[in-house]
Image (cartoon, rainbow, N blue to C red):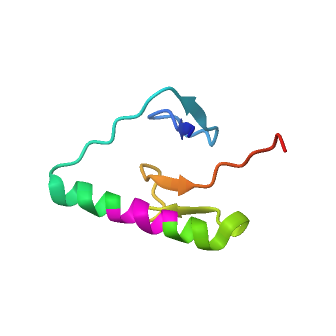
Amino acid sequence: MKLYGYANGDDSEALLELESVSICFQGPEAARKFADFANACANEMKAMGDNYDHVHFAGGERSDITIERLLDFTK
């Protein structure tokens, strides 16, 4: 797994590789909603294989979370 993100307040489109990430939820229902999203993405990734690209959790806003297939360019 690799983690990427954008710098806060930077309008650049350049992704930064991150060492760690904290995902903070207001309560258990929000955490379950994210877990359901991640599980649905895993199912879609398995079904689509190499055709899976990414899915947005919050509709594509800049402060969104996406689950993406990590491409292996070493093959």
Query: Is residue 61 shown above or below 40?
Result: above
Q: Position of residue 32 (x, y in %)?
A: 25, 60
Quadrant location of the N terminus in the rendered image: top right
Q: Residue at x 51, y 55 (%)?
A: 67
Outermost residue toward the left in this view: 27
In this orientation, which residue lies closer to the viewer: 49 or 5?
49
- Mark count: 0
Q: Which residues are magenta?
A: 36-42
Q: Is residue 58 visible?
A: no
Q: Residue at x 50, y 55 (%)?
A: 66
- Residue 9 horizontal side relative to residue 75, left or right: left
Provide the major secondary structure of the magenta segment: helix
**Residue 37 falls inside the magenta stretch:** yes
Outermost residue toward the right in this view: 75
Query: Is residue 60 shown above or below 17?
Result: below
Query: Is residue 8 shown above or below 36?
Result: above
